[in-house]
Amino acid sequence: MLEIGTKAPGFTLPDQDGNMHSLQDYRGTKVILYFYPKDSTAGCTAQACGFRDLYPQFTEKGAVILGVSKDSVKSHKKFEEKNGLPFTLLSDTELDAIRKYDVWKEKNMYGKKVMGVLRTTYLIDEEGFISRAFAKVKASDNPAQMLEQLG
């Protein structure tokens, strides 16, 4: 996990509509950057729907939400449409941002060791620095936790 106070690594990734987004595009805005393992799985759906349900409060506080996984643009589009997600999902099939943010880790899945995305959420301030970092977050609690961090 990256340390609080460090400059957030830049990236450019496509969203669920195929539009490119760079972290630099969000300078001057607080960014909730959350990494999750897989679209349409129970935990990831609970987390995304939690961010969806609290979305008006996040926008009130001037924050944007960017969800990142290694799923395809097409998978993200289905996930967005199925759950009515009002925020941006970024597709990182090459693991560019996932590796830069140190969330590609060995995990234990049903007794087997596999590589995967460790559910992690970063709060990036208006100047592009990491102000909060949470690893191994509980999917259903993370949206409220992040809203609280915005004050």
Image (spheres, rainbow, N blue to C red):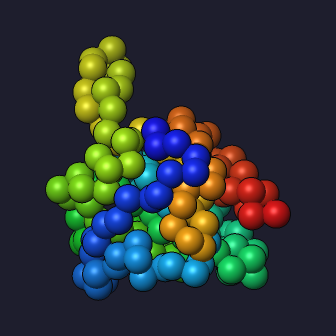
Query: In the figure, is residue 91 to the left or right of 101?
Result: left
- Can residue 84 be seen in the rendering of this structure? no
Q: How many marks?
A: 0
Q: For the point 36% across and 21% down, which residue is it? A: 108
Where is residue 122 drawn, in percent x and y? 54, 54
Where is residue 54 drawn, in percent x and y? 71, 69
Compared with residue 4, is residue 127 higher up or lower down, i.e. above or below? below
Q: Quarter of the image containing the C terminus? A: bottom right
Where is residue 98 drawn, in percent x and y? 32, 50
Q: Nearer the viewer, residue 27 or 118?
A: 27
Q: For the point 58% across and 81% down, which residue is it? A: 28
Q: Nearer the viewer, residue 35 or 73?
A: 35
Residue 111's image quarter?
A: top left
Q: For the point 68% across and 69% down, which residue is it? A: 53
Q: For the point 34% across and 79% down, which residue is it? A: 21
Where is residue 113 drawn, in percent x and y? 27, 20
Query: In the figure, is residue 10 to the left or right of 45?
Result: left
- Residue that protrudes farthest toward the top in the picture: 111
- Residue that protrudes farthest toward the right in the picture: 151
Residue 106's image quarter?
A: top left
- Can residue 30 be seen in the rendering of this structure? yes
